[in-house]
Amino acid sequence: MHIPQFSILYVANPVRSALFYRELFQRAPVEECPSFAMFVFDSGARLALWAREQVKPVVSQEAGAMELAFPLPDDASVDASFAKWQADCLTIAQHPIRMEFGYTCVALDPDGHRLRLYCPAPELT
């Protein structure tokens, strides 16, 4: 069985996106050049940012077709993180709302990729 090792976001400007995610994650990328950056997390998860115009084969899909989801321990943490995102002037796609899977909100990165904060519904934990 193949298990994914990391996710790649295709971005317009990897340098700009790396600055955005450096602030969001509070960590520096482990690899960075004008066309690519990669973040590695304590869990072993990795997130790469790759210049859209250099991806082969050519990318035909626009941003926003996937999300980075950030689980949080409680609704108050979602609200606090959402308030920080607003203060940091992130584009907000969805204000905090209770949905069937839990309490959630969505912001966008500079390329329109979705960033979802959520606290799972108690019956799902």
Image (spheres, rainbow, N blue to C red):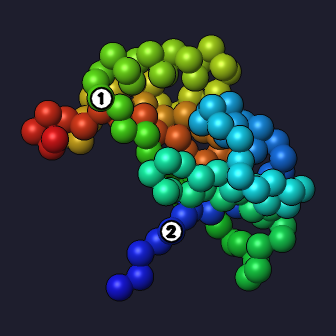
Q: Quadrant of the C terminus?
A: top left
* Residue at (45% x, 51% y) in the render: 43
Residue sitting nearer the eye, 19 or 89: 19
Residue beneath label 2, please?
5
Q: Secondary structure at mark 1?
A: loop
Across and down, in percent, residue 76 comes to 33, 16
Residue beneath label 1, please?
73
Query: Left of 35 or right of it: where is 110?
Result: left
Q: Looking at the image, can residue 57 be seen?
A: yes
Across and down, in percent, residue 81 comes to 48, 22
* Residue at (71% x, 41% y) in the render: 28
Residue type marked 1: Pro
Q: Residues within 10 Å of mark 1 (few under 14, many from 20)?
A: few
**Image quadrant in which you'd find residue 52:** bottom right
Residue type marked 2: Gln
Q: Residues within 10 Å of mark 2 (few under 14, many from 20)?
A: few
Query: Left of 34 or right of it: where is 101?
Result: left
Across and down, in percent, residue 51 comes to 80, 61
* Residue at (71% x, 52% y) in the render: 30
